[in-house]
Amino acid sequence: MRLTEAERAERHIAVAAAAPAFICILEDAPGDGAHLEALLASAPGATALGEARRLWTEPLDALPCSCGATVSVCGHWREVLIRAGMGAPTLKRLAALEERALAGRRLLRAGLSLKHLAAAADMRAFFALEDRLFSAIAAVSGARLLIERTACAPRAWALATRAEVRVARTRGAPADGVKADMASRLLRFRTGVAIVDVAALAADPREEMRRALGPGIAGAVDWREARDFAPDPNRHALSPPQGEIARALRAAFGDGATSVAA
């Protein structure tokens, strides 16, 4: 059934009213934040998005959801896009707005200022569309906290302009991600970015989360033992299928992590 413009506007207003809290994980290298993402997503009322911007930068019929289906046939993502009133043209517009808003020359002209970036017309238009999408995800999943991870430093930079977004940067080997390191240093100076050490997280996840993110967030994780936790059973993240996530987690936490992403 096709919605009238008035009905679509009413739906978008209702969706925007349910805007959730947000954590963006800025990775040194792709995949560095998978362990932290899984930990955070185990908390009640939280859900992982994976690499969210892939939704508007890649074809949906080739984009894998962690449930094993592609986004184009995944029931969760189909419901999200319908609820948000988004089809291919809107997703294409999201991509175009993001590309213009985060162009390197524009960022440099603005002096890498979060205030100037947030005030740009393209950025405001991008966030207006993105709010519809993320609020729809929250409504469909029932989540109050959305968790995104990205190795794209400008993406984290844009999200850092928003008061409801907390940025956590995963720090791997010293040589990893020069661009991400540069951006996270500036973000830390301007917005208090949390730095999570990947090796320390693998060795003692509770302590590293408590140190980097605070006891409240660390205590919300569904811990089973010192280094083991219960995964989000309804995970629909834009990242590799669960089997690949499980292998990455075992690499970090050892065989004791078998139950984490099974």
Image (cartoon, rainbow, N blue to C red):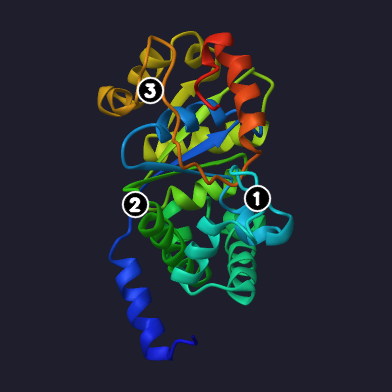
Residue of label 1? 69
In space, the residues marked 3 and 1 are separated at their CA atoms by 34 Å
* Mark 1 Cα shell of 10 Å, populated few (<14), some (14-19), many (≥20): some
Q: Earlier in the sequence, mark 2 or mark 1?
A: 1
Q: State the image coordinates of residue 219 (x, y, percent, origin top left).
A: 28, 23
> Dot 3, crowdedness within 10 Å: few (<14), some or many (≥20)?
some
Residue at figure coordinates x 72%, y 60% from the top left:
61
Amino acid type at circle 3 is: Ala
- At horizontal 48% and vertical 59% (from top left) the residue drawn is 117
The mark found on residue 142 in the picture is 2
Q: Amino acid at mark 1?
A: Ala
Provide the secondary structure element on which disc 1 rests. Answer: loop
Q: Of helix, strand and loop, which one carries label 2?
A: loop
Residue 180 visible at all:
yes
Going from N to C along the chain, the mark reached first, 3 or 1, is 1
- In the rendered image of this protein, does residue 190 appear above or below residue 114? above
Residue assigned mark 3: 212
> Which dot, 2 or 1, sits closer to the camera?
1
Residue 261 is drawn in which quadrant? Answer: top right
Three-letter code for the amino acid on which mark 2 is drawn: Gly
Q: CA distance from mark 3 to mark 2?
A: 27 Å
Q: Kindly identify which numbered label has been placed on residue 223.
A: none
